[in-house]
């Protein structure tokens, strides 16, 4: 388990360093796209993918049904949208709304 934590920590450090490299390259190029920014972005993408893989390793290695001969695929359920708000429980003023006791009558 310690080697998994070390692997995850190392890949995270590489990912953060690559992100810093993108920011530095962009700053040095005054926000213009050039070969240095392209290379930094490509390095960032690779580090991001490696970091995602290292994050998934603990899930696949801790699964009792995983076998050494077959790769395990981790599927995540689709995200559910939040339920619609309940109008009876909607936040609002705690004091009763102003209601005139008699209808307004305009006179001239």
Image (tube, grey):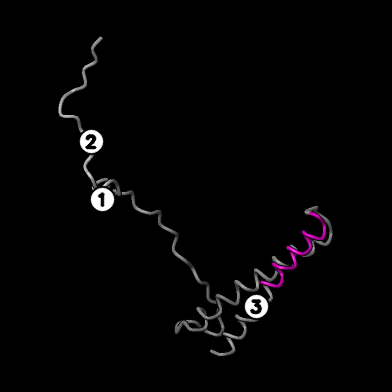
Specify the quadrant that holds the C terminus: top left
Q: Say which of marks 1 and 3 sits in front.
A: 1
Task: Give the structural element (helix, strand or loop) at label 1.
Answer: helix
- Tag 1 residue: 89
Apparent side of residue 100 relative to residue 16 in the rendered image (left or right):
left
Above-or-below relation of 94 to 36: above
Residue at (52, 83) in percent of width and height: 61
Point out the residue furthest to the left here: 101
Task: Give the structural element (helix, strand or loop) at label 3.
Answer: helix
- Tag 3 residue: 11
Q: Which residues are magenta?
A: 16-30
Q: Earlier in the sequence, mark 1 or mark 3?
A: 3
- Tag 2 residue: 98
Above-or-below relation of 106 to 24: above
Report, in whole angstroms, how far the alpha carbon at label 3 lies from the one at label 2. 60 Å
Report, in whole angstroms, how far the alpha carbon at label 1 lies from the one at label 2. 20 Å
Q: Which class describes the residues within 10 Å of circle 3: few (<14), some (14-19), or many (20+)?
A: many
């Amino acid at each position: 388990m310690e080697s998994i934590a070390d692997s995850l920590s190392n890949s995270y450090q590489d990912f953060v360093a690559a992100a810093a490299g993108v920011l530095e390259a962009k700053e040095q190029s005054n926000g213009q796209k050039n070969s240095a920014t392209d290379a930094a972005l490509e390095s960032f993408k690779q580090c991001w993918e490696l970091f995602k893989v290292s994050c998934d390793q603990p899930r696949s290695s801790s699964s009792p049904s995983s076998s050494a001969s077959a790769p395990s695929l981790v599927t995540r359920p689709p995200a559910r949208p939040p339920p619609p708000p309940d109008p009876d429980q909607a936040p609002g003023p705690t004091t009763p709304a102003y209601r005139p006791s008699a209808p307004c009558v305009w006179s001239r």
